[in-house]
Image (cartoon, helix red, strand yellow):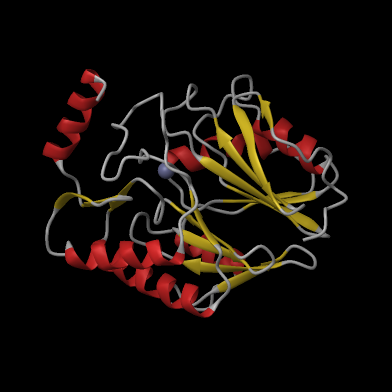
Amino acid sequence: MEANPHVAAAYHRQMRGLEVVRWVGGSTVVLRQDIALNYEAPFLFLLLGADRALLLDTGATADPARFGLRDAVDELIGTDTELIVSHSHAHGDHVAADGQFVDRPHTTTVGHTAEQVAAFFGVDAWPTGSGAVDLGGRVLTVLPIPGHHPASIAIHDPATSLLLTGDTVYPGRLYVRDFPAFLASLDRLCDFADTHPVEQILGAHIEMSTTPFRDFPLGSVRHPAEQTLAMTVAQLHEIRDAARSVADSPGAHRFADFAIWNGPSRGALAWQLVRRALRR
Ligand SMILES: [Zn+2]
């Protein structure tokens, strides 16, 4: 895409509690919360169109003195640009800084329930249908993908061939609350990715190391030799196939590039805490 005139500073940089990780073309910013501030270290995305920008997720920390998300966004797009604040899903590590945008002019924050998300993006049928949002010369497709959370969505951007998948597809521990819904969402995502341009699938966390099957234990505040965020359509299919294979097996299941937690697993959780304590 062409560089967006609203964008002030197109370079990698650190801000207060977050980092501009990279740019995709001239109009998409990949941001990440500093892992020292919160071990979840979620990724956030800022997509710019000719008329407005969309921020996907607001991170895990509310306090603007430690996590300067609003200032970073204003610096990147300018204070006069219309902004939509939306969420991959409404867990606390993705909505914490919503409050920083309450008094921002020209700003709409999408609600946290599936009903509110569907209404905002005009999703015709939840979860099997789709919605859209026009940023001005850049129309994003919004796909409901419940399973991790009832209001989970994926966003597809045909301009960059990015598919943003939140906590449903990423190189880490995929925590599943509603397994039938999760599996159906993965089926729909695979169908979509097979029939639309998708070059990179970007989720919201990295918990895998570069060593296959090896994740960083829950709560780790250092991620040496971290896997890259971007996943491929082939890996999406692997996740779907893996999910099918463990659909009837509650508990944590490890795979080379990800893990699937089918419902809560006290044993697996305890082992995570032991591993973190032992730093392994
Ligand atoms: Zn998360």
Q: Is residue 18 above or below residue 150?
A: above
Q: Can residue 127 be seen in this view?
A: no
Q: Residue at x 49, y 34 (%)?
A: 60
* 180 displayed left or right of 77: left
Q: Which residue is drawn at 16% across and 39% down?
A: 268
Which quadrant would the C terminus be assigned to in this image? top left
Q: How many labels does the image show?
A: 0
Quick one: 59 or 117, which is closer to the camera? 59
**Which quadrant does ligand 1 occupy?**
top left
Q: Which residue is drawn at 65% across and 23% down?
A: 16
Which quadrant would the N terminus be assigned to in this image? bottom right
Q: Is residue 25 above or below residue 134?
A: above
The x and y percentages for residue 6 are 85, 48
The x and y percentages for residue 179 are 25, 62
Q: Residue at x 32, y 40 (%)?
A: 211
| Residue farthest along the front direction in this orientation | 211
Which quadrant of the figure has residue 169? bottom left
| Residue farthest along the right direction in this orientation | 5
Quick one: 269 or 119, which is closer to the camera? 269
The x and y percentages for residue 129 are 48, 78
* 11 displayed left or right of 6: left
Q: Can residue 255 be seen in this view?
A: yes
The x and y percentages for residue 203 are 47, 51
* 4 displayed left or right of 185: right
Which quadrant of the figure has residue 198? bottom right
